[in-house]
Image (cartoon, rainbow, N blue to C red):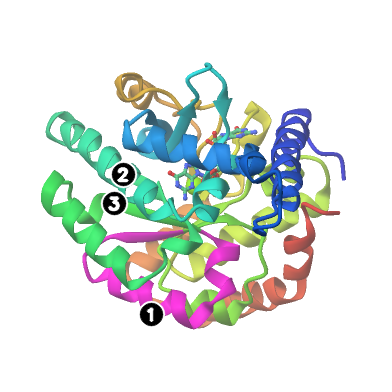
């Protein structure tokens, strides 16, 4: 399958950085006999030290990308995305520096800082906003531990940000990698009142049983699904299926990486309730995102079946036909899920 040019370039950049790190790692020789001991401060270690310093000096920042409700057209949330600009002016992609932070055991400090910084910024909006918006913060697989409970609790206490408006995003692959552990910790965090989103859904390999066991409030549909959706009938079928799966499992659904009007219209037609992407707003500085959220992407009436679906869920009336439609959605999901997991590679 053809990848969009932007995605391909981004992946190539990432691969370059990762190769650099890998080569540097292979070159390391910590044996005392090694005559070139001083040369051990290679690029990999150099980056780790530089990132640690940037963290210490608070040289990282958090940008925010707006999210929209496609039914009302109104802004409904923001995703916090960490940014690192080196002193040379070079911008390092988070997909790269998050990995560096994970390798260098800096991810806990970085993750706690991002959470605190995003909640502090968003608290100021809360008092002014006409309606509450969700703040989504990405959490690394390595942060899924007992200690993070305390980090969330302290952050909410110190910043005064309302727990019910905070959403923690964890990738599908991270959640599935250690399912029992994810379930245990997610349940504990949710006792604090926060919500959980499964990020990049469609790139991992969750089964229906793992999906129904994980205490997840929202599925974030990966942008590869959005891209594929308009290319052929199968892509559209998968998107339709995943949107209805979310509704059947009482999970909110949001589509990521919406770049074109065609994608936005199609998502609306399929009854996808929320969306995020460059078309609607790029990640931007905190001062700008409130204005971006005020822009309305309205007049896109949701299809009747999506509205009927909501009404049924709200009244908790699952009649025989709804139950049978649920069974058929789930059966189709089980039948096609291998395809979803392989979309990015096919
Ligand atoms: P993600 O959480 O899936 O975030 C969405 C990524 O897609 C962001 O990339 C965003 O800029 C990009 N994006 C949004 N709309 C579009 C679009 O329409 N088209 C395209 N091509 N891209 C779009 P970014 O900021 O480079 O972040 C990449 C990943 O790095 C994130 O993916 C997330 O997994 C990770 N990340 C970012 N900030 C943090 C953080 O504070 N902590 C952790 N653990 N991970 C983070
Ligand atoms: Mg995310
Ligand atoms: Mg994502």
Reading the image, the residue beneath label 1 is 184
* Magenta segment boundaries in residue numbering: 171-197
On the picture, is 312 further left or further right than 220? Answer: left
Q: CA distance from mark 1 to mark 3?
A: 19 Å
Q: Is residue 33 above or below residue 58?
A: below
Q: Which residue is located at x 64 percent, y 58 percent?
A: 32
| Label 1 or label 3, whichever comes before in sequence order | 3
Residue 140 point in image, percent of width and height? 47, 56
Label 1: which secondary element: helix
Q: Earlier in the sequence, mark 2 or mark 1?
A: 2
Query: Which of 141 and 25 lies nearest the eye of the viewer?
Result: 25
Quadrant of the image occupied by residue 58: top left
**Identity of the residue drawn at 38% across and 80% down:** 184
Q: Is residue 38 above or below residue 171?
A: above
Which residue carries the number 3 mark? 166
Magenta segment's dominant SS is: helix
Q: Nearer the viewer, mark 1 or mark 3?
A: 1
Judge left or right: residue 203 versus residue 156: right
Q: For the point 57% across and 20% down, which residue is it?
A: 90
Q: Quadrant of residue 96?
A: top right
Image location of residue 70, percent across then percent down: 46, 39
Describe the element under mark 3 as helix, strand or loop.
strand
């Amino acid at each position: 399958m053809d990848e969009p040019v932007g995605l391909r370039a981004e992946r190539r950049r990432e691969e370059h950085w990762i190769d650099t790190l890998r080569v540097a790692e292979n070159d390391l020789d910590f044996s005392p006999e090694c005559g070139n001991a001083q040369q051990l401060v290679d690029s990999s270690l150099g980056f780790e030290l530089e990132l640690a310093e940037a963290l210490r000096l608070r040289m990282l920042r958090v940008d925010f990308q707006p999210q929209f409700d496609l039914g009302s057209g109104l802004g409904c949330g923001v995703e916090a995305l960490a940014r690192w600009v080196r002193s040379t002016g070079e911008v390092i992609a988070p997909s790269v520096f998050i990995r560096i932070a994970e390798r260098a055991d800096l991810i806990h400090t970085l993750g706690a800082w991002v959470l605190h910084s995003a909640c502090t910024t968003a608290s100021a909006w809360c008092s002014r906003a006409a309606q509450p918006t969700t703040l989504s913060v990405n959490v690394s697989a390595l942060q899924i531990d007992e200690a993070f409970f305390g980090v969330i609790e302290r952050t909410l206490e110190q910043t005064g940000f309302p727990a019910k408006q905070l959403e923690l995003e964890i990738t599908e692959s991270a959640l599935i990698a250690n399912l029992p552990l994810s379930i245990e910790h997610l349940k504990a965090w949710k006792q604090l009142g926060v919500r959980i989103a499964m990020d990049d859904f469609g790139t991992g390999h969750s089964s229906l049983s793992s999906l129904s066991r994980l205490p997840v409030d929202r599925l974030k549909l990966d942008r590869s699904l959005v891209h594929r959706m308009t290319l052929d009938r199968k892509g559209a079928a998968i998107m339709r299926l995943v949107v209805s799966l979310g509704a059947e499992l009482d999970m909110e659904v949001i589509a990521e990486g919406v770049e074109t009007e065609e994608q936005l219209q199609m998502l609306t037609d399929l009854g996808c309730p929320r969306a995020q992407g460059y078309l609607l707003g790029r990640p931007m500085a905190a001062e700008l995102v409130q204005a971006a959220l005020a822009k309305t992407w309205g007049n896109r009436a949701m299809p009747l079946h999506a509205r009927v679906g909501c009404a049924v869920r709200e009244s908790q009336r699952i009649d025989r036909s709804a139950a049978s439609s649920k069974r058929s959605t789930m059966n189709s999901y089980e039948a096609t899920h291998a395809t979803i997991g392989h979309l990015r590679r096919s």
